[in-house]
Image: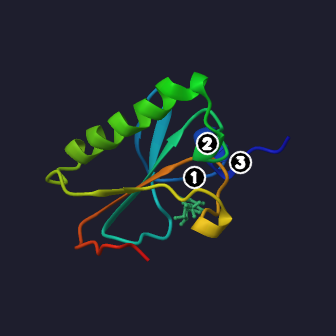
Amino acid sequence: MSSTLFEKIINREIPADIIYEDELSIVIKDIQPQAPTHLLIIPKKVIPKLSDGLEEDKETLGHMMLVAGKVADLLNLDDTFRIVINNGAKAGQSVFHLHLHLLSGRSLNWPPG
Ligand code: 5GP
């Protein structure tokens, strides 16, 4: 099977601005930022989308949330950020390797578009 775009980034086959990495996850800058800070928190395990997550992925899924808080601290985001997961093409997902978007640095409207 061919690897996902994010696996290629994890494997350093294509470049990215890497902000943080640990054994379960990597955090990169989004190539097309939608806010002054726009990061992608990506699990190293390929789960195509959130709704494909299994009971056995509990640690990975929880870890991503904790990493979001950790990088927000590292980057001094003043506890002000939004996490988004697009699940499925109709919800805006374009890369089928689960990732959290972390957006910060501008006012964020609600409801989201
Ligand atoms: P999705 O649409 O699947 O929720 O989010 C995918 C995100 O990946 C988009 O925000 C898009 O800008 C970002 N993206 C797509 N290709 C690349 C790339 O090659 N490098 C980086 N850093 N981000 C990418």
Q: Secondary structure at mark 3?
A: loop
Residue 101: x and y, percent? 43, 56
Q: Foreground: 17 or 39?
A: 39
Q: Secondary structure at mark 1?
A: loop
- The residue positioned 61% from the left and 62% from the top of the image is 93
Residue 97: x and y, percent? 64, 47
The residues tagged by marks 3 and 2 sit, at their Cα atoms, a distance apart of: 12 Å
- The residue positioned 67% from the left and 45% from the top of the image is 48
Q: Nearer the viewer, mark 1 or mark 3?
A: 3
Label 2, ligand 1: CB separation under 8 Å: no
Q: Foreground: 15 or 79?
A: 79
Mark 1 is on which residue type? Pro
The residues tagged by marks 1 and 3 sit, at their Cα atoms, a distance apart of: 14 Å
Report the residue marked by disc 1. Answer: 15
- The residue positioned 59% from the left and 40% from the top of the image is 10
In this image, 6 relative to 107: left or right? Answer: right
- Residue 12: image quadrant is top right
Mark 2 is on which residue type? Arg
The coloring applied to the image is rainbow
> Which quarter of the rendered picture does the N terminus lie within?
top right
Report the residue marked by disc 2. Answer: 12
Report the residue marked by disc 3. Answer: 4
Q: Secondary structure at mark 2?
A: loop
Ligand 1 lies in quarter = bottom right
Residue 51: x and y, percent? 61, 45
Q: Is residue 72 above or below residue 44?
A: below
- The residue positioned 58% from the left and 56% from the top of the image is 87
